[in-house]
Image (spheres, rainbow, N blue to C red):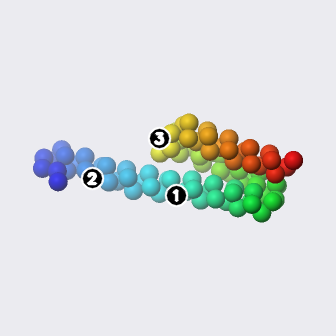
């Protein structure tokens, strides 16, 4: 438990950040699940639309350091590869 005033404030800030980042991570997962659902459904047009909606969200969350930039790039790349395979 934090004993000093400064440490108590830091604990409050850390908790607020944790809650915010958890919410943002959940949002990214939701967008990714929508893309995967469209891919599994076999609908290329819907998958592309969902992927185009998900890309800016993933990038924005990576800019905020909720996801690392490399993880975001890897995630987008893997989704895009699956969508391309669906078209072929």
Identify the residue at the far right of this view: 88
Q: Pinpoint residue 36: horizontal percent, then vertical percent.
A: 69, 57
> Can you say whether 70 is above or below 22 in the image?
above
Q: Pinpoint residue 60: horizontal percent, then vertical percent.
A: 56, 43
Mark seen at residue 26: 1
* 35, 40: nearer the viewer: 40
* 37, 20: nearer the viewer: 37
Q: Pinpoint residue 65: horizontal percent, then vertical percent.
A: 47, 41
Asked whether residue 9 is in view, the answer is: yes
| Total numbered labels placed on residues in the image | 3
Dot 2: element: helix
Dot 2 or dot 1: first in sequence order is: 2
Observer-side mark, 2 or 1, equals 1
Dot 1: element: helix
Q: Does the CB distance between marks 1 and 3 fall below 8 Å? A: no
Mark seen at residue 65: 3
Residue at which label 2 appears:
12
Dot 3 or dot 2: first in sequence order is: 2
> Can you say whether 42 is above or below 10 in the image?
below
Q: Pinpoint residue 51: horizontal percent, then vertical percent.
A: 71, 50
Q: Does the CB distance between marks 3 and 2 fall below 8 Å? A: no
Residue at (18% x, 44% y) in the render: 6
Dot 3: element: loop
């Amino acid at each position: 438990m934090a004993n000093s005033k400064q440490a108590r404030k830091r604990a409050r800030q850390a908790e607020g950040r944790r809650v915010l980042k958890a919410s943002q991570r959940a949002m990214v997962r939701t967008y990714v699940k929508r893309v995967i659902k469209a891919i599994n459904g076999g609908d290329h047009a819907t998958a592309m639309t969902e992927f185009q909606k998900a890309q800016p969200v993933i990038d924005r969350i990576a800019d905020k350091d909720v996801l690392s930039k490399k993880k975001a790039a890897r995630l987008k790349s893997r989704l895009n590869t699956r969508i391309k395979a669906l078209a072929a």
